[in-house]
Amino acid sequence: MAYLLLLFLPLAAIAVFALLGYGCGTLGRLGVRQAGREIRLRCAAAVLAALAVGMHAWGMLHVAGAVLEAEDGGTSSSPIPSCRTSDEARWYHVIDYHVSYLPLRFVCETTDGGGYTPDTVPGYVGPSAALLALAAAGTGATAAIESERRATRVRRGTRAVQGKADDAG
């Protein structure tokens, strides 16, 4: 479980820097005023996607800390330190834990087959990552629609120019 987190965190960091590099680099190279609407929308979608991935990675850091604390062992390791909440009655029935990546959470499993989620991941991480991802997808879709409209206008313009050349010849 912890190995998967160790894989995801560097990949998330690479994705954040790649998306930010694309979004900010493209606008920096072309200039905001010279870039068309399609380019500005693509860059905005890349930055929003970078923020969504970064927010999810922030939550994964919290989960990784809880996993490391749970795997630590030693004195005072039962019940699992990450599963200790203000409700002591639940603590002493914890037998294991598991990690859920979507939605991001650390779940403590109890002897009765149930489980509960302690407050290891801040409450704002899931909703903000989802909203940022949704905004990135919407902005990317708008950029694709704008690109298609521009391509259609260029094709119509090319046909009109060819038609005039055929009429003149």
Image: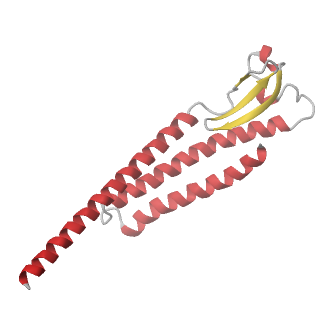
Q: Relative to 43, does residue 2 appear above or below in the rendering?
A: above
Q: In which quarter of the image is the N terminus?
A: top right
- Seen as rendered, the residue at the extreme top is 89
Identify the image quadrant of the C terminus. bottom left
Residue occupying image coordinates x 77% and y 48%: 3
Position of 82 compared to 52: left or right? right
Q: Residue at x 74, y 50 (%)?
A: 6
Q: Observer-nearest residue: 148 or 40?
A: 148
Count of number-bearing discs:
0
Residue 167 shown left or right of residue 91 in the figure: left
Camera-nearest residue between 81 and 15: 15
Q: Quadrant of residue 42?
A: bottom left
Image position, residue 163 (x, y; %): 12, 75
Q: Position of residue 93 (x, y in %)?
A: 83, 19
Residue 101 image offset from top left, x and y in percent = 65, 39
Q: In this view, does 103 lie above or below 57?
A: above
Q: Most extreme residue toward the left, as rendered?
A: 168
Residue that appears at 43% across and 52% down: 45
Q: Which colour scheme is used?
A: secondary structure
Give the residue at x 84% y 38%.
71
Q: Is residue 118 left or right of residue 132?
A: right
Q: Which residue lies furthest to the bottom in this view?
A: 169
Q: Is residue 56 above or below residue 14?
A: above
On the image, which quarter does residue 107 sit in? Answer: top right
